[in-house]
């Protein structure tokens, strides 16, 4: 029910995720930067988020295509609603979300979600150089908005690291989590743009239950 309410205006969608390249040798302590930029493997967290969305769209008879970010063109994004999975491993996520209140920034060795309304205050971040298995907390953005560049509805499911992306996907399909969010939503929320920042504890690269830390409706 909550997925239907969330994406009721999504009829024919592109699901766009990270590109897939050749696998790299195993390393004992791969950093977050290595996983995002260099591993070339489709991470299990991205796969889980993608699987949830494909299942939800398929159950409701929605037609869709699954593309990597390197395959997707701007012309294709203008054809219909789009679901974007991942942030720093998905160039379209970064481009289309850059004007949102809560957006992604990489600078000075950190990756962050910043609040553009309060740029010197609220932000959620982690370090590029931290060993991936040592990440204890991750953050993610879940958003649905009408994008003025493509003229289409965009659904964004993206974490700073892969665990955040997985937690964001889980959030969309957890009735209890979504019901809690809707208690603070305006009555007309199904027709509004919305953006949510999530926080999740991470153990050995896998996320715990996501927690809402910021919400914006407009």
Image (cartoon, helix red, strand yellow):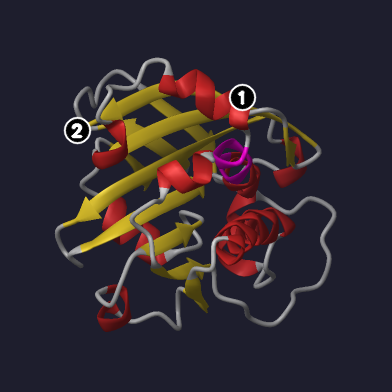
Q: Quadrant of the C terminus?
A: top left
Indicate the secondary structure of the residue bearing disc 1.
helix
Q: Residue furthest left?
A: 148
Task: Measure the alpha-carbon separation of dots 1 and 2.
Answer: 23 Å
Q: Is residue 195 placed above or below 184 in the rendered structure?
A: below
Residue at 60% from the left image edge and 64% from the top image edge: 54
Residue at 42% from the left image edge and 69% from the top image edge: 13
Indicate whether residue 171 is drawn in magenta: yes
Residue 2 in percent (x, y) is at: 51, 38
Q: Is residue 195 visible?
A: yes
1 vs 2, front mark: 1
Indicate whether residue 32 is drawn in magenta: no
Identify residue for label 1.
Answer: 176
Q: Is residue 19 placed above or below 98 in the rendered structure?
A: below
Identify residue for label 2.
Answer: 218
Residue 160 in percent (x, y) is at: 52, 44
Q: Quadrant of residue 80?
A: bottom left
Circle nearer the N terminus (1, 2): 1
Residue at 31% from the left image edge and 38% from the top image edge: 190
Circle 1 packing at 10 Å, graded few (<14), some (14-19), many (20+), is few
Residue at 44% from the left image edge and 60% from the top image edge: 84
Residue 69 in percent (x, y) is at: 45, 73
Tell me which segment is drawn in magenta.
168-173
State whether the magenta stretch is mostly helix, strand or loop: helix
């Amino acid at each position: 029910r909550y997925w239907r309410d969330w994406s009721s205006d999504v009829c024919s969608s592109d699901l766009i995720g990270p590109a897939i390249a050749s696998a790299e040798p195993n390393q004992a302590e791969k950093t977050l930067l290595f996983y995002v930029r260099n591993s070339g493997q489709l991470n299990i967290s991205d796969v889980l988020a993608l699987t949830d969305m494909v299942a939800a769209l398929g159950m409701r008879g929605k037609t869709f295509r699954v593309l990597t970010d390197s395959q997707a063109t701007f012309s294709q994004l203008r054809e219909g609603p789009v679901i974007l999975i991942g942030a720093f491993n998905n160039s379209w996520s970064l481009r289309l979300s850059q004007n949102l209140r809560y957006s992604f920034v990489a600078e000075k060795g950190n990756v962050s979600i910043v609040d553009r309304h309060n740029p010197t205050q609220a932000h959620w971040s982690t370090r590029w150089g931290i060993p991936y298995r040592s990440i204890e907390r991750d953050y993610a953005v879940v958003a649905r908005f009408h994008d003025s560049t493509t003229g289409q509805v965009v659904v964004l499911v993206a974490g700073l690291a892969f665990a955040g992306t997985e937690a964001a996907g889980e959030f969309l399909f957890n009735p209890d989590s979504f019901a809690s969010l809707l208690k603070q939503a305006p009555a007309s929320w199904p027709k509004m743009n919305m953006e949510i920042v999530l926080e999740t504890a991470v153990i050995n690269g896998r996320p715990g239950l996501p927690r809402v830390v910021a919400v914006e409706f407009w």
